[in-house]
Image (cartoon, helix red, strand yellow):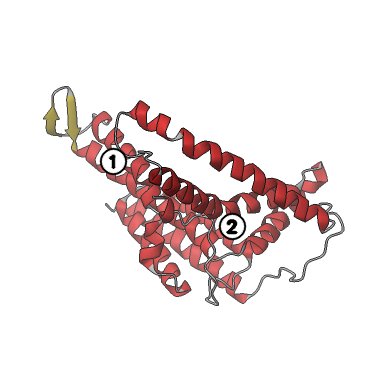
Amino acid sequence: MLKNMTLGQYFPGDSFIHRLDPRTKLLATIALIAIVFVSQGFSGFLAIAAFVLIAAASTGIHLKFLFRGLKPIMFIVIFTFVLNLFFQTGGTELVRLGFLRVTDQGLRMAGFMAVRLILLVVCSQLLTLTTSPIALTDGLESLFRPLEAIHFPAHEIAMMMSIALRFIPTLMDEADKIMKAQKARGANFETGSVLARAKAMVPLLVPLFVGAFRRAEELALAMDARCYRGGKGRTRMKQLKYGTIDLLAGLALLLLLAAVIALNALGAF
């Protein structure tokens, strides 16, 4: 499961999406998430999915790689599906399992919530896969800069968020190595009761946390050795600037929003 974690990885390229200003991609991701919540039917989700898949295909990222990142959250998706399936009691009864009832409305709501979660994750993955950590930091800092008037640490917050995203695949890779080493010593992470599996995770979590703190200390020393003193007075090799492609991306999102609102108004499935 750990090797399927794609959040935080960067896929280099020169596509239309890669060339977008990082601020545009951040705002577009927020807008896409908002549009997902605006949609009130599967037809709206279909329009959003088509938009996201076209955008992903244009980046050169294989769709199989994109959907591989869904495997770590499949438990949450299935749990949400089952929860809505059995506890949404309105509508016509389809199946009864003891005191549990499956209704048509419950089935629809379960599928609706599962698809919504999947779309939210895929939209977030597109941001990190097509934006380098440095560009992401610059974009976040630029968006947070107006808050500096109220003494908000824009650069520091942007740097911490970027480092956190960047270290996700690194920590996942280290966890995978530790897990394989523990399995070679006879550890069992997959069988037994829930309590037994929880206890088996201790030999994995302890060295993982120790390694994380060691990496954090090494990073702090490296930044200090390079005279890093925060965002004040810092310059950038690449200046952020909106272009025509950013305007086109904004128009595409407006068209998507209009399409979803129209589908909602028409009462489409």
Against 95, residue 57 (above or below) is below
| Horizontal side, residue 122 vs residue 149: left or right | left
Is 173 placed left or right of 224 in the picture? left
Q: Which mark is residue 27?
A: 2
Q: CA distance from mark 2 to mark 1?
A: 29 Å
Residue type at mark 1: give it. Answer: Ala
Q: Amino acid at mark 2?
A: Leu
Percent across and percent down for residue 96 are: 12, 29
Is any part of residue 37 visible from this angle? no
- At x 28%, y 45%, the residue is 111
In the rendered structure, the answer to whether residue 57 lies left or right of residue 225 reads left
Residue drawn at x 38%, y 53% as measured from the top left: 70
Residue under the image location 43 percent in, 43 percent down = 182
Residue 249 position by quadrant: bottom right
Label 1 CA crowd tier, 10 Å (few <14, some 14–19, many 20+):
many
Residue matched to label 1: 110
Vertical order, 140 against 111 (above or below)? below
Tag shown at residue 195:
none
Q: Under tag 1, what secondary structure?
A: helix
Q: Position of residue 251 (x, y in %)?
A: 53, 68
Mark 2 and 1 residues: CB-CB less than 8 Å, in contact? Answer: no
**Which residue is at the far front?**
185
